[in-house]
Image (cartoon, grey):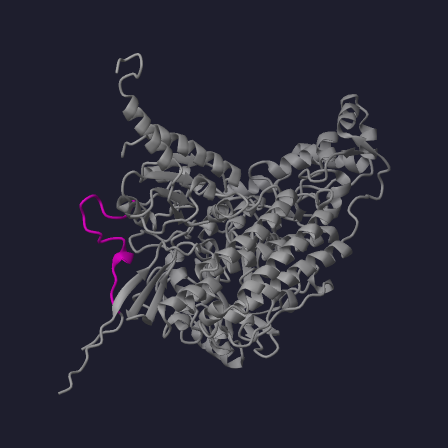
């Protein structure tokens, strides 16, 4: 086919878009729930503010089966190695959501036992600040993550 | 509001608190409500540990006195930002303490049939850091095991009959005892956990050992 | 020839991160097949240094930290801390303020039990019950949101009173919501209480005897399920609980089913308490001297024009949920000790004394000064006796705040509950302990 009829790379970019679309609407979250943000996570995944609309209804409690690691709530130094290990066990493609300000920057827990932001130990894809974030904020955050996933297309890293 | 009435006992430094606790248990105090400690090493000092800090805060300013005069000339009542009836210049500073730590056991006599709280007792014991003087109360009330572990964890108070006491809330690799007054809250500890390629030897909760030994 | 079979046990780690949404805790189990031979709990994975932070913050600033202790019933922690500090200072808040605190506490107790029952039902497979109860919890969160400004981290109380008065129409909204909440609880009850699967899993599991529960200092629904009717609201009534009529549900056998029933019954009692409060609460609107209310901008203009005498006479018409708001509302919900509470907005903006008062309470190293001393005060939290041991050295901040966590006691008794049972029994038992890591690890 000539280039002006179907430009080069049409098939593969459409494929990338399709993969991105499929991935963004079938998120399998791994909710690493520690603290108060867990209450908002429960509210978001329940019927009022539904996570099922993103295809993320059932949390997959095995890191091998999940692709989104939602770190919900304060991470202390004692649990940080566990979190790192879970992240390492997940298979690509994987994304990390820092849910709540304690995971983004440590929150107001500037002390000897709180990790000041999980981006000191993991690469984070989405930061949802708030103490705790309202469910609407979480939904907006997940929609932003979806855009990011769409743009990534079929890439694994 | 019905406040709790405490039967307060103070143990003299040097006297064993355990005997008193045993006697109280025999008297019917069947519940250990709480066991905690206070570190009095910064008692009477200002927030920066500076003794003059308190005095600066306690003296009312000139403007303050002027407003008081104006208000009373107008016949109005203007309160000062200190609780009325307290002379902050002298009473604001607390009485100094000799020993560094003070622990308190809070006991309750609970009637199992009616659920009435028949009385509360508080046993205070003040002591310095070394040598360790406290005996564990875990043989009287089993929950004292965890409460003592927490006091060791946070304050570093030793118990004479618990040489291998484990931390409760923090991990074994943690250095220091955080609730002591000389531990700054923002002190950072190094991150623990296996570095890339190392076997997961730490933190200590990675070790699993069975408790039952078979021959 | 018989061979001695060698008994082998193996160690299993349940946690520190496990699928039950209870938070982070590690259970070390020694198993023989599926039977638990011995167990140990390791806690402290959410240690956030509450007690150390409380020593660095001023008296009122500690209240947001108390929110995050038992984060499913934050208002109870707020009220407990404020009452402990007030006991140390010898203050009481006015009657309407006390009723508001009781309403807040009981709404929080309902959310606590809804979360506990919902989450533990979900782990046993009853996902519908989880959705129903979380739906009911959402409505209560919306009520709490309109009352305090936030759903979970409420920071509603201050030393001497509460943040602000009830929003308009709160009572009608509450009563409408309670009707729906009662329906949701009744639906869940229908689904669970006579359900064969649920009963098989929770009947007879996690049993604890009265003597053991007392030896471990357990209080709350856990103790009441064994048959001891101890409730801090009855034993040491605080706020206005001695004027309210409520029952304390008591179980008999100390197993998981009794705890579930206790919690369901307590929710109904809490809703009844709130309804009684609405009937008994003293009217909050009128102050004795002021005759007229003016709009806030008119009030402001009067001040700018120098009519300061008129400022004392009138009140500004502002929303009653404005924090430290209007003079008339303020004196009903907060103590009038000027050393402790911020002045109302009219006084702060309209008179020099009020401005100075406000400034001196806010300024660093001034602020509220509580006389030296120590005290212990207990309130009935969702899990039992929530105690606050507060020590003051006469300064603008606490010297030591200790929170006595009610869920530490059943966690210390966990080996008694789990040993001898199966792994499958751990799930309902642990769910009924209602371990809240924020409170356990502080």
Residue C59 vertical position relative to residue C292 in the rendered view, above or below: below
Q: Nearer the viewer, residue C333 or C85?
A: C333
**Range shown magenta:** B191-210
In the image, is B176 to the left or to the right of C58? Answer: left
* Outermost residue toward the left in this view: C1
- Per the picture, the main secondary structure of the magenta-coloured stretch is loop
Q: Residue at x 33, y 62 (%)?
A: B166
Q: Position of residue C387 (x, y in %)?
A: 55, 60
Q: Residue at x 72, y 57 (%)?
A: C275
Residue A1 vertical position relative to residue B4 in the rendered view, above or below: above
Residue B18 vertical position relative to residue B157 in the rendered view, above or below: below
* Outermost residue toward the front in this view: A1
* Outermost residue toward the right in this view: C291
Query: Splitting the image into 4 quarters, where does residue C221 fall?
Result: bottom right
The quarter in which the C terminus of chain A is drawn is: top left
Query: Splitting the image into 4 quarters, where does residue C315 fall?
Result: top right
* Outermost residue toward the bottom in this view: C1
Is residue B30 visible to us here?
yes
In the image, is A80 to the left or to the right of C159? Answer: left
Q: Is residue C359 magenta?
A: no
Q: Nearer the viewer, residue C202 or C337?
A: C202
Q: Is residue B200 magenta?
A: yes
In the image, is A151 to the left or to the right of B114? Answer: left
């Amino acid at each position: 086919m000539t280039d002006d009829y179907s430009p080069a790379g049409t098939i593969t970019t459409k494929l990338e878009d399709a993969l991105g679309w499929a991935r963004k609407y079938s998120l399998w979250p791994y909710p690493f729930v520690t603290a108060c943000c867990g209450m908002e996570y429960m509210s978001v995944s329940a019927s009022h503010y539904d996570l099922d609309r993103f295809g993320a209804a059932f949390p997959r409690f095995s890191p091998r089966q999940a692709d989104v690691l939602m770190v919900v709530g304060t991470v202390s130094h004692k649990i940080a190695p566990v979190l790192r290990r879970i992240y390492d066990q997940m298979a690509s493609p994987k994304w990390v959501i820092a849910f709540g300000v304690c995971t983004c920057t440590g929150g107001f827990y500037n002390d000897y036992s709180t990790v000041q932001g999980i981006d000191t130990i993991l690469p984070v894809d989405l930061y949802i600040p708030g103490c705790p974030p309202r469910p609407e904020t979480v939904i907006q955050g997940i929609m932003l993550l979806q855009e990011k996933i769409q743009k990534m297309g079929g890439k694994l890293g | 509001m019905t406040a709790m009435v405490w039967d307060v006992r103070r143990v003299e430094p040097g006297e064993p608190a355990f005997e008193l606790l045993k006697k109280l248990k025999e008297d019917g105090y069947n519940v250990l409500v709480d066991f905690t400690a206070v570190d009095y090493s910064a008692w009477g000092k200002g927030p920066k540990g500076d003794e003059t800090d308190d005095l600066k805060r306690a003296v009312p300013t000139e403007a303050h006195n002027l407003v008081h005069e104006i208000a009373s000339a107008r016949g109005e009542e203007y309160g000062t930002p200190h609780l009325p009836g307290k002379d902050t210049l002298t009473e604001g500073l607390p009485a100094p303490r000799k020993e560094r730590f003070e622990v308190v056991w809070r006991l309750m006599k609970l009637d199992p049939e009616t659920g009435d709280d028949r009385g509360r007792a508080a046993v205070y014991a003040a002591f310095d850091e070394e040598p360790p003087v406290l005996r564990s109360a875990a043989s009287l009330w089993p929950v004292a095991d965890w409460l003592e572990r927490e006091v060791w964890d946070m304050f570093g108070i030793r118990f004479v009959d618990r040489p291998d006491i484990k931390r409760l809330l923090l991990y074994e690799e943690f250095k220091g005892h955080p609730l002591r007054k000389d531990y700054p809250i923002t002190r950072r500890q190094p991150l623990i956990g296996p570095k890339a390629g190392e076997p997961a030897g730490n933190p200590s909760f990675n070790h699993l050992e069975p408790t039952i030994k078979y021959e | 020839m018989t061979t001695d079979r060698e008994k082998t046990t193996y160690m299993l780690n349940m946690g520190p991160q496990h699928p039950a949404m209870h938070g982070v805790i590690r259970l070390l189990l020694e198993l023989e097949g599926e039977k638990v031979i011995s167990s140990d709990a390791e806690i402290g994975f959410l240690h956030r240094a509450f007690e150390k932070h409380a020593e660095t913050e001023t008296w009122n600033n500690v209240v947001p930290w108390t929110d995050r202790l038992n984060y499913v019933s934050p208002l109870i922690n707020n009220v407990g801390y404020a009452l402990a500090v007030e006991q140390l200072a010898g203050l009481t808040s006015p009657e309407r303020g006390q009723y508001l605190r009781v309403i807040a506490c009981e709404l929080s107790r309902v959310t606590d039990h809804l979360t506990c029952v919902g989450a533990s039902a979900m782990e046993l497979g009853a996902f519908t019950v989880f959705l129903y109860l979380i739906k009911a919890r959402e409505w209560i969160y919306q009520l709490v949101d309109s009352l305090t400004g936030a759903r979970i981290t409420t920071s509603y109380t201050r030393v001497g009173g509460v943040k602000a008065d009830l929003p308009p129409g709160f009572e009608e909204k509450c009563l409408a919501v309670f009707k729906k909440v009662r329906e949701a609880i009744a639906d869940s009850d229908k689904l669970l209480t006579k359900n064969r699967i649920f009963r098989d899993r929770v009947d007879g599991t996690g049993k604890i005897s009265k003597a053991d529960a007392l030896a471990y200092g357990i209080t709350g629904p856990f103790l009441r399920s064994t048959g001891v009717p101890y409730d801090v609201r009855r034993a040491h009534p605080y706020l206005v609980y001695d004027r309210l009529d409520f029952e304390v549900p008591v179980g008999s056998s100390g197993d998981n089913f009794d705890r579930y029933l206790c919690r369901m019954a307590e929710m109904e009692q809490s809703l009844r308490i709130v309804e009684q409060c609405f009937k008994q609460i003293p009217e909050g609107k009128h102050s004795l001297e002021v005759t007229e209310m003016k709009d806030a901008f008119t009030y402001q203009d009067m001040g700018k024009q120098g009519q300061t005498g008129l400022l004392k006479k009138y009140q500004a018409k502002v929303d009653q949920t404005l924090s430290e708001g209007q003079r008339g509302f303020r004196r009903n919900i907060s103590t009038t000790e000027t050393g402790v509470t911020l002045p109302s907005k009219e006084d702060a903006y309209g008179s020099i004394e009020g401005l100075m008062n406000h400034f001196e309470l806010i300024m660093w190293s001034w602020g509220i000064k509580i006389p030296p001393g120590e005290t212990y005060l207990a309130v009935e939290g969702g899990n039992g006796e929530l105690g606050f041991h507060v020590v003051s050295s006469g300064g603008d901040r606490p010297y030591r705040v200790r929170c006595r966590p009610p869920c530490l006691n059943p966690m210390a008794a966990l080996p008694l509950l789990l040993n001898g049972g199966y792994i499958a029994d751990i799930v309902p038992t642990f769910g009924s302990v209602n371990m809240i890591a924020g409170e356990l690890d502080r």
